[in-house]
Image (tube, grey):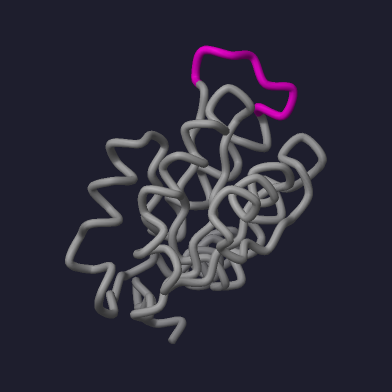
Amino acid sequence: MLQDDYVTFTIGKQKNIALIAHDSKKQQMMEWAEANKEILKNHFLCGTGTTARLITEKTGLPVRGYNSGPLGGDQQVGARIVEGKVDFVVFFWDPLASQPHDPDVRALLRIAVVYDIPIATNKATADFLLNSKYMNETYDHNVVNYGKVIENRIENMK
């Protein structure tokens, strides 16, 4: 495995979807979740603090809640991505508002890219992804084999 440049991961037919929204986008997230309830009910849902609770209250969908974003929820979702327990992120992000946890938001976005998972940061992208043919089938994706990268760095330091 360490000799390969990439590691192939499979996102299953039933996705593990994280739902996150900044305060000014929570209403839009709840409306989006309600409009897409029939699709979302077929997947495992999690989310940060208030967003998870509001979606459950509005839609009746079970959403596993983590901490609020500023209290570590974004980092918890990022950790689940690393563990292979989040396959897909819908994050209604407000790029025009200052966020006290902006470094956490950037770290979450970075880890989603590192692990090559779909991440929608607005409603239009979420709509496109949710209605993709891949929502109903498995999807194999290649992730850089960072074990090999680290091994090569160590070798080059000798």
Q: Residue 2 versus residue 96: which sits nearer the camera? A: 96
Asked if residue 93 is positioned above or below residue 115 in the image, the reply reads above
Q: Which residue is drawn at 35% across and 36% down?
A: 123
* Place of residue 79 in the rendered image (x, y in percent of width and height, measured from the top left): 66, 60
Magenta segment boundaries in residue numbering? 95-102
Which residue is at the far left? 133
Which residue is at the far right? 71
Q: Relative to 59, is 129 on the left or the right?
A: left
Q: Label the magenta part by its dominant secondary structure.
A: loop
Residue 32 is a magenta residue? no
Q: Residue 46 versus residue 149: which sits nearer the camera? A: 46
* Place of residue 52 in the rendered image (x, y in percent of width and height, measured from the top left): 65, 51
Which residue is at the far bottom? 1
Q: Which residue is drawn at 58% across and 14% down?
A: 97
Residue 99 is a magenta residue? yes
Image quarter where the C terminus lies is bottom right
* Place of residue 156 in the rendered image (x, y in percent of width and height, measured from the top left): 52, 61
Q: Residue at x 45, y 47 (%)?
A: 90
Image quarter where the N terminus lies is bottom left
Q: How many labels does the image show?
A: 0
Asked if residue 28 is positioned above or below residue 155 in the image, the reply reads above
Asked if residue 117 is positioned above or below residue 32 in the image, the reply reads below
The answer to which image quadrant residue 36 occupies is bottom left
Q: Relative to 105, is 28 on the left or the right?
A: left
Q: Residue 139 versus residue 129: which sits nearer the camera? A: 129
Q: Which residue is drawn at 20% across and 59% down?
A: 132
